[in-house]
Amino acid sequence: MLRILRQVSVLITLAVLTVSALAAGINERSFPPNTKRGVLNGAAYPDVVIDGKIRQTLPNTRVYNEENLIVMPNQLTGNYIVINYFENDFGEVEKIWILTTAEIAKTLPKAEVWTPIPFKNPTLN
């Protein structure tokens, strides 16, 4: 009986690992609207150089590597890293994603342009 329970537990463990490995391969990263693409070069933290321009980061800026794991911004080394990045309303970099070769081949959707919606007072017709 104990032998059968061990075999069943091993089979369940293998099935769970297989399903999680398949799910990890299927999941694509989604980027928020108005994400931009650029080339990251090494710089002195807390600043980053994107497309040759020094950009400011925030204390809570998150950098994600190719596996979507968080990397500390001061650990970024190397030049010419293709990234997607997201800026806040003040132009500060909030999030950085280091892209895989498959993601580099894809194009980003067009940036959304904010347009005001005119208010119409229903009581004044």
Image (cartoon, rainbow, N blue to C red):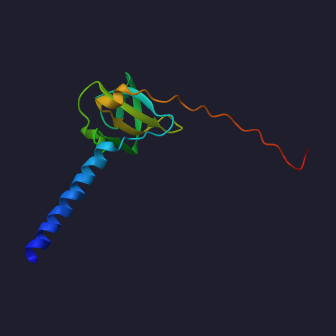
Of 45 and 40, nearer the camera is: 40
Q: Which residue is located at x 84 percent, y 46 percent? A: 121
Of 118 and 103, nearer the camera is: 103
Q: Is residue 71 visible?
A: no
Where residue 36 appears, as percent x and y from the top left, is: 45, 30
Q: Is residue 95 shown left or right of residue 74?
A: right
Q: How many marks can you see?
A: 0
Q: Which residue is located at x 41 percent, y 28 percent? A: 37
Where residue 108 appears, as percent x and y from the top left, is: 45, 29
Extreme residue in the bottom direction: 1
Q: Is residue 105 shown left or right of residue 11?
A: right
Decide: is 82 above or below 17.
above
Q: Is residue 51 visible?
A: yes
Quick one: quadrant of the N terminus?
A: bottom left
Q: Quadrant of residue 2?
A: bottom left
Of 23 and 39, nearer the camera is: 23
Q: Which residue is located at x 41 percent, y 31 percent? A: 55
Of 102 and 55, nearer the camera is: 102
Q: Quadrant of residue 4?
A: bottom left
Decide: is 10 above or below 27.
below
